Image (cartoon, rainbow, N blue to C red):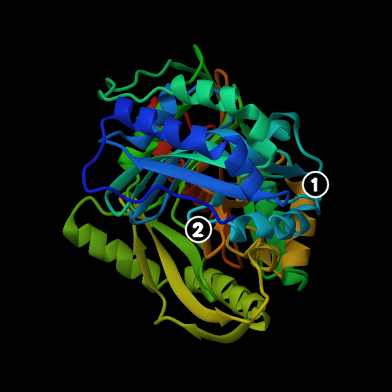
Amino acid sequence: MAARRCGVLRREARPGRARWRLAGLVSRALSGGAVEEAGLEERVVRLSVPVGEVDPLLWLAAQRPGSRLYWSARGGGFEVAAAGEADALVGWPGECPAALRKRQGLLLAGDGGTRYYGGARFDPARRPGAEWEPFGAYRFVLPRFELRVREGMRELACNLVLPRDADRREEILEELEALPLPEEELPAPRFPAPLRRSDAPGFAGWRAGVGRALAAFEEGRMDKVVLARRAAFSFGGPLDAPALARALRAVTPGCFHFYFEPQEGAAFLGASPERLYRREGRSVTSEAVAGTRPRGSSEADDRALGGELLGSEKDREEHAYVLRSIREELAPLCESLRADGDVSEMRLASRRHLVARLRGVLRPGVTDADLLETLHPTPAVGGYPRRAALAELRSSEPFDRGWYAGPVGWIGAGGAEFAVGIRSGLVRGSELALFSGAGIVRGSAAAEEWAEIEQKISDFAGILGLEGRDASG
């Protein structure tokens, strides 16, 4: 039995009425006759109803902590908040591609709307730090409940897995009945005061790491490596992670926004400008992003900074490694692959980057698991060549990246989209760890790269009052 979905109605429903109508659909889907019709083979049943003007992040904040997530596409068009789990893929390093392939059957049983959301570690071969344990080597969730916004239409949905959920009818209906549907705006969040900051590495360690990288370039062992930092902040009380995600969304237009909370008290969130890939059927798009400059304070200043980035030999070299690697990795998976124009600027609210896009047609049988396994990590977050850069990071980086710079996004039957989990932070109670990196190539200077990372974490810093807490001294 294929997945079922309530058709889109012309009239939006009030939240309370939407919940009541959805409960009726769920009750019928879990009735004895419907479950028997589904047979023994597992199938996803996705049920949805229109809902009124509800902000997905406000809805997310109202849900019970634990197993919550949020995703919005760069440039708009799709936004989802979700709570609970109808199905989950969580496992050990090396299992992710095989596990995703096994779930392809459930995805194909959907109507195109069935999606698993999640992500994976930057480096599954590295032993995970304690702060990342709730996330696993990878974690993909088919949510129990979703609030979706797509092309201006809002819907409340419930995902069922039959016949597995046949005996959980009353439990699921009780969860749906208790599902909050806020209709009013919340006041602007007030965050606790920051108390302390620590950096790993500190500036001395950072300078030494850049020096090692430059020596490796001279010896011919690497051409590029992306060194990262972990800036940890302690606050005077617990951080409201959904409120932080909402504030971050407001100041970072034009980015992918993500929030993953596998259990209460642990949330990974961010605003990434960088797409790993997007798949629509057999069509695939990827992009090479590198180089950073801030936006200018005036139109003339902004033009000057844009020209400086486009004309920078060092940034052009850094970007060329990223583009070359993605082309080399993606080409064997494609029947055709082409560059979509020349290198250009990606302009964001507070910064700009060099970007070039690649478009291709995948060979028959190529899956999202193949794309993830092949493309991640790109030289934009790892280095070039990949193996040498990863070996350098494993031996010298003094912290576990966890999901930072890993792939985050969604997978469906007819498509998928993943961003690179950069410009991100990990919230655990009253602690926040911010992660960011800088591409090191010949000609890089430690102080300049340190300052670039400070600029990259400035979105979080501005929201939380962290300005002026640079630990370089």
**Residue bearing mark 2:** 111
The image quarter containing residue 438 is: bottom right
Residue 468, visible in the rendered structure: no
Please name the amino acid that badge 1 sits on. Answer: Arg
Residue 324, visible in the rendered structure: yes
Extreme-front residue of the structure: 33
**Residue bearing mark 1:** 126
Residue 245: image tag? none
Please name the amino acid that badge 2 sits on. Answer: Asp
Q: Residue at x 58, y 43 (%)?
A: 34
Report the Cα–Cα distance between label 1 and label 2.
38 Å
Residue nearest the viewer, comparing 343 with 170: 170
Q: From the viewer's perspective, is the residue at label 1 or at label 2 nearer?
A: 2
* Residue 344 percent across, percent down from the top left: 37, 73
Q: Residue at x 80, y 46 (%)?
A: 126
Numbered disc 2: secondary structure: loop
